[in-house]
Structures are given as C-alpha cells and as structure tokens.
Amino acid sequence: MIPMVDLKSQYHNLKEEIDRAVIEALESTHFILGPNVASFEKEAAAFLGVPHAVSCASGTDALHLAVLAAGIGAGDEVITTPFTFIATAEAICYAGAKPVFVDIDPRSFNINPDMIESAITPRTKAVIPVHLFGQPADLPAIRDICVRRDLLLIEDCAQSFGADINEVKTGATGSFGCFSFFPSKNLGCYGDGGMIACATEELAEKIKLLRNHGSRARYHHSVIGFNSRLDEIQAAILRVKLKRIDTFNRERKRVAHLYSELLRDIVETPFEDGIGTHIYHQYTLLSDRRDRIIARLAEKGISSAIYYPIPLHRQEVFKSSCAGISLPRAESVASKCISLPIYPEMPEESVRMVAEGVREALIG
Ligand SMILES: Cc1ncc(COP(=O)(O)O)c(C=O)c1O
C-alpha cells in the first residue's frame, strides 16, 4: 500500500519532539494566542523574509482575511486562475467580489501572465496567483502588471511554503501571502491552520484585528471581525516542523526528479519553468490515458489523485457567472492530469514501484 502522503512516518520521525511540544502546550494551559503562536509567527516571518506573519485558522481564512484587509468588496473583480482549489475563489466571493478567471500556462499549470491584462476592467482590484503544486507563478511578470495597473497582488501560497524565485520566498512579493497548514500540506499541522505574510505593519494590524473579533483590546471592537486563530498546540507542532522545511522540500524534489528520470520517455512529466524553485507539493503528470494509470496503480495498492478534475469556471457554483467562458488550457489540463504519491520520507523503492505501475499501464 502506497498512500499519496504518509503522515505517519513523518510523525514517527519527529515523535519525541512533537509530543514534548504538545505536552508543554497542554501543561501551560495557554491555548489561544499564546507564546507558541507569537514565536511561530516570528520564526515563520524570518524564514520567509517578510516583515510580518499573522497566523489564522486555515488557508481559506488566510485568503478571506487578506481579501477583506485589502479593502475588496461588493462590485469589485479579482483576477485569478481557474486551475486551483475552490478556496481561492471562495475567498473572493465571501467578500462580495467576483472572481475573474484567466487561463493557465499548460506546462507550468500556473496563471498565464500574458493573458492577465486583457481581463482587467475598471472594477479590477487585485490579482491572486496560486503557486500551484509548489511551483512559483511568474511573480516578476505579474507584479509588473500589478504595479503598472495599480492592482493589489495577493499570493495563494497554500502549496508553496519555502519555494522561491531568486531567493525571494513565495509570499514575500505581494501585499499578502496566504498559507495553509492543512495536515497534508508540505508544512502541515495536525488540524486546520493558516497564515498571512504581510508586506507592512499596517496590513498586519488589519489582519490581526480581523482574525480576533475586530478587537485590539479585550471587549473593545472597532470592526466586525472573525474568530480565526491558530491554536497553541498547532503552533507548537508547526515550530518543530518549520525547522525541517528545507529538508522536507529537498526530499520532495529528490522523489520528483527520480520519478521524472523513470517516466519522461513515456509520459508528460512536470515542467520546471525555471522562474523559481519547484518544491513539488504535488507530482503531476499529463496523460490521455490517466484512467488506465489510476486503475493499474490501484491494482497494485498504490494511491493516485486528480488535482483538479473540473476547473473552477466549469463548476456548478460558477455556472451562471462563467456562462460562455472558455479557458481551453485549463480544461485540457484538468482532463489529463494525474498526481502520484509524494512525501519527503518516500523510500526510493516505493518511487520505483509507482513508476513501474505507470509504465505497465502505458506500455503493458
Ligand atoms: C491552492 C489552495 N488554496 C487554498 C487552500 C485552502 O487551505 P485550507 O484547506 O487550509 O483552508 C488550499 C488547500 O486546501 C489550496 O490548495
């Protein structure tokens, strides 16, 4: 049995340290916005090279709070990619704004910057690129458009903790960088969690206000906010894992490069566009015969997954707002993509077994 991610082996490798950190948090009985959250935010900001990092309850909330803190609301439009998890678009909709989907580069799977300008209208307020599967979107080009057209840049970094472009980490270019610590993320906690990297103190203060009931001082509320806080136990776990994130990402790359070496002669393996470093949150192939791959792997007890089978503009929820919109590259990729198991602790033997399964499916 080979799972998509093996959270158990990572936990067992770090068990002593994680158990100690959790027990210390329990013993302190300080559960909300305590010392672990404060330290994690400082450590994460230092790692990312950003002035401020403010944690919250999930990656979805990170995006939602960032969109609100950016002042985006009803009647506004936000440009984003159709090839992402629904949360990217949900955050825009929560604020009452409209997601405007721009097609992707079919090789990197990220939003195509060359197609952004023609989607800008007087109502456009921001662009939210997603660093999908751990490969940075073309931030230099996107930032250039945002600066010229006076748009905010909000990065969806849910799948890219630690990826960089010329040593600038994802999350450090936009006004906000939004992270998810969902357990299967490359930096994951043991529940839900999220964080917003903020470019200025003013923006960080807005996020802090929003995540905690619009309150700076207890029982004084200046805006309508939310209950969206990372808890101390999750922060304690994340502090243990943050110290290892570069190693985790390096090991993901090891797995990915071995897969590509074993498979590139028979199937379209992931394309590294060279704009930044790919940390392989997912390892995703393109194949017209993905059903055969899925079936053969399943016979061998190997998991696989389709991220994502339906691009957002084709989802039922956007049926009326996206009627008549065709984004052929996202549609084509969604019809052919298949992701293979990948995690830092994955043994070479397992990588070879998975690759063998793919070969069997494609060439018998
Ligand atoms: C690209 C992307 N954006 C946002 C999210 C939302 O994060 P969360 O599940 O922590 O709310 C996820 C993860 O699920 C994601 O993959």
Image (spheres, rainbow, N blue to C red):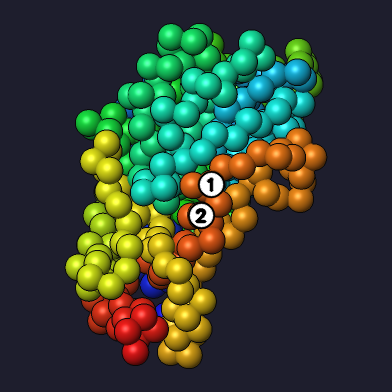
Q: Residue at x 46, y 16 (%)?
A: 146
Residue 91 occupies which quadrant of the picture?
top right
Q: Amino acid at mark 2?
A: Ser
Q: Secondary structure at mark 1?
A: helix
- Residue 363 shows up from this direction: yes
Residue 83 drawn at (x, y percent): 54, 46
Whether residue 316 is situated above or below residue 121 in the rendered picture: below
- Residue 178 shows up from this direction: no
Cα gap from disc 2 to disc 1, whole angstroms: 6 Å
Residue 295 drawn at (x, y percent): 50, 83
Marks 1 and 2: in contact by CB < 8 Å? yes
Q: Residue at x 45, y 86 (%)?
A: 296
Q: Nearer the viewer, residue 103 or 93?
A: 103
Residue 125 drawn at (x, y percent): 60, 16
Q: Residue at x 47, y 72 (%)?
A: 290
Residue at mark 2: 332
Q: How many numbered marks have been drawn onto this rendered protein structure?
A: 2
Q: Amino acid at mark 1?
A: Pro
Q: Is residue 107 left or right of residue 66?
A: left
Residue at mark 1: 328
Whether residue 61 is situated above or below residue 95 in the rendered picture: below
Q: Quadrant of the C terminus?
A: bottom left
Q: Residue at x 22, y 31 (%)?
A: 166
Mark 2 Cα within 10 Å, few/some/many (few <14, many 20+)?
A: some
